[in-house]
Each structure stands twice: as C-alpha cells, then as structure tokens.
Image: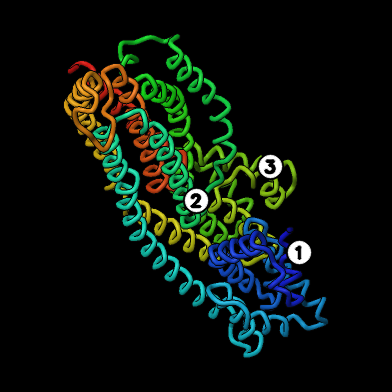
Amino acid sequence: MRREDIFRKLILGKPKRLGLFARLKYRDHVSRLEKEAPFAILASSMVVESVLPPLKIIDVLSKIDSLEAVSFEAKRILRDTQLNLKHLAEQLEEEVKNNTGVWGKLLASIVNVEASGLDPRLVFNDLLQVALRDLRTMYEKTSRRFQTLISSASVIFGAFPMMISILFAIMASSSIIPLVLSYMFAVFFMAVTWLFTVDLQVPRLADYKPFYKRILFKWLPLGAALGVSSYIGLIYTPLTLVYRKALSLLLGTLAFSIPSYIEWRKQKMIQEELFETLPIFLRSIAEQTSKGFSVGQAIENILESGGLGKYTSRLISLIVKEARIFGSLRDAYGRLKELLPFPWRVSLELLALTDELGSGSGALHRLADTMSEYMISIREFRRSSTGYSWLSLMMAGLTLVLMMVVSNTVMVKLALIGSVLEENKGMVSLPFNPPSPSELPVLKDWIYFMITSNILTLAVVTGKTLGWCIGDSLKELLKTSLLTLTFMIVGWGML
C-alpha cells in the first residue's frame, strides 16, 4: 500500500482497515517526521526572515525534498485544505489537534502567529532554540541508552555464547551438531534484529547504500572464493586439521574485510571532513552576504580563498561549476543532492531557498548556528561510547582461551572415557554419550566454527552500535579476525 493510500484512509476515518504493514509504514513516517522537524523549524525561521506571511511556510516546506517526511506532510496538509474546502489557517488548526512533538509545535506556532500578529521572527527563533535544546537532550538520553546497549551486546553476543560453547564442549557428542547449527541461526537472527533496532535510533547523516553495494560486488567474491578454497582443501595448512570450518570462515572474512576497510576508511575520512567543515562553510557564506555579496558569489569567494580542506574544496568547486553551467544554486543542488551527506544536502537546499527568497545574512547566520549546534550534538553523542570499542575483543579473547583449555583437557578426557565405555558397554551410565577419539576432531571443528561465528557476529554488532554504520563493523571484523587467527595459531602450537 502506498503512503498516499495510507493517509487517504486515515483522512476518511478508516484506521481499522489499515493492515499491519501499512501501520508500520505510518509509524516510520511519524518517526522520520519528528527527526526532520527541527530542520523544518529552521527552514520556517528563514522563510519569515524574508517577510513572507507565516502561512507561506507550509507551501515552502512542501517543496523541500531534502526533508522527505516534512515535504510529504506539508503536501498532505495542502491537499486536505482543498479536499475539505477550508482555508489553510482552519486546516492547520485541525492539524494541531492531531499532532504532537516538535512537528506539532511548529504547526501551533504558525497558527498562533497568524492569529495574534506576533513578530514571526522572534517566535520562530525561540522555537528553534527550544527544538535544538530538546534535540541535544534527546541525544544525551540516547547516548546513555547506547552505553547500556553495548554492555548488553557483550552479554548477549559475548558472555552467553561463551557459556553455551563451553557447555557444548563439556557435553560433546555427535548429537550436539544440530544444536550448534540451531544456536548459530538464533544468534544470527538476534544480530539482525539488533542492527535494525540500532538503525532506528541513530541520526541520519549519509546514505552509504551505494558504497555497500560496490564493496559487496567487488570484494565479497574474493572472500567467498578464499573461504571455500580453504574449506575444500585447495588451500592446505596444518591448522585445517583442527580448525577447518573456523579457519575457512576467518580467511574469507579477512579477504573481504581488509580491502573493504581500506575503502571505508577513505570514505569515512571524506565524510568526517565534510561534517567538520560544514559550520565553517556556512558561517563564511553568512559573513560574505553581510558584506553585500549574493549567496552564489559568496560560495565562489570561499572557493578562491580556500582553507576548508581537500575534499570540502572539491565539493565546493563542484557546486560552483554546476551552478555556472545550469544557471542557479537550485539547479546545482538538484544535480548533486544524491551525492551529499544529509546535513550538507539540507544546508545546500536552504542556501538555495535563502537565495531565492532574499532572506538576508541574518537567516544565513541562523543556519550556521543551527548546523554548528547540530554537529556538536552529534559529536558528543558519538564520543560517549568510544570507551567500549575494545570490549568485544576482550570477550573474544576470553572465549577462545577458555575453549582451548577445555578442548585440550576436558574434551580429551571425555574422549578417553568414551573409548573405555565403547569397549566396556554397560559399565556405567552417563546422561550423554562421550565422544570417541575418532569423533573428537569433528566435534572440535564444529564448536570452534560456532565460536568463530559468534565472535564475528559480536564484532559486527559492536561496530554498528558504536559507529552507527555497518561500514564501521569492518574495522571490528578485521581486528577480531586477526585476534582469533592468532589465538588459533598459538593454540595449535600448544597441541
């Protein structure tokens, strides 16, 4: 069901007829609307700086495609105004009754300013400050929640799998292989659910899907080929005698994660530079326009003066070239919007809007202040959990050490007991069947495979929770794979 159909049914008063999928889409829309609402308030404050009437805000917001949920909601309000044969002010009064949160405050402010005749610049400036404080408070709460999440991840994907692995090793028999596979599937399902949960809570900064597709098509075949070659024996090492499945998984992961991480590191370095220089770039434009330059000319002056970093200068150069070729900053935005991180995309479209409305340097200073505050909040949010980056490695090392001790002592003794019981059947009864010496290598292989899979899953979960992106898991995968391989080499040398 399309989003338009969902809202049409809601307007007609038929929420009971909405299916589960439609309800989830609607909840997702409301969530994204609240996340974009502070930027909608910023755009509204820039609109009133150009001395336009407050009701014009809805029309302007409907055309800001960088705020997809806000744009859709504004279009829906304009559509409902026509369907219900009402004045826009009357329709907004109805919307205020049905909306809460930051978006509801924005609509209420438009109605109040329109009805009372207050200075809209003061009202929306105050509302913007409140929205930014609320945003910062929300990020502080979320950062504390993420600290709890990463601690929980070390238990769910680290400590608990470690206990299960030791239990399987102590009760090793051929009957545990289906249990091993079932537990691996359960851990995978929990990890996918965990990643989606984290993704719903983090701020939207950039769309990395094209990058992920590129590295998957580029390096995943290499990792799969190396892992399969190791498993079927084309790549033979003494380690494959004990860790055949685990070693194949590790080699495949290393072959994929090493080149992928190199590319991701460059990608992340570019994004970090763009995020750091955005407030400076916007402040420079505001200062230039206060001296009488247009927004387009101010951007060209900043490009000539330089000093904003290698990749930022390249982006500004691209903006200037596109604006010169196609005639306006709006056209340049339309050509580049799919390539830009979210803060840059919003900023560039608001710059184009300011240029079109003639809002002046005051609106641009407000844009610079808001983006600076936003990036500071994001930076503090990220730094709050950096101390947990080594937690997954410590848990992985502890799991491997315990497993090597158990496999070289308890499992060996159980195999000897199994050999004695096989020769003297009925001598004693045990709750499980101890493995025979011939079964021991196979069982060790499966258990180490489960441990390696769990450890790598913990690395992915840790990277995503700390860095907010699956790409940040590549570094954790690389470190964890190297650590696990080192422990296996040491363990094999001790046999």
Residue at mark 1: 5
Which element carries disc 2, helix, strand or loop? Answer: helix
Give the amino acid at mark 3: Glu
Residue at mark 3: 322
Viewer-nearest residue: 249 or 86:
249
Cα–Cα gap, marks 3 and 2: 37 Å
* Residue 344, numbered label: none
Viewer-nearest residue: 417 or 68:
417
Cα–Cα gap, marks 3 and 1: 37 Å
Viewer-nearest residue: 24 or 436:
436
Q: Which is more N-terminal, label 2 or label 1?
A: 1
* Residue 196, numbered label: 2
Badge 3, how many Cα within 10 Å: few under 14, some, many 20+?
Answer: many
Q: Which is more N-terminal, label 1 or label 3?
A: 1
Q: List x then y, in percent, for residue 466.
A: 37, 47
In the displayed structure, 137 sits above or below 390; it is below
Give the amino acid at mark 2: Phe
Residue beneath the point at 69% across and 44% down: 335
Give the amino acid at mark 1: Asp
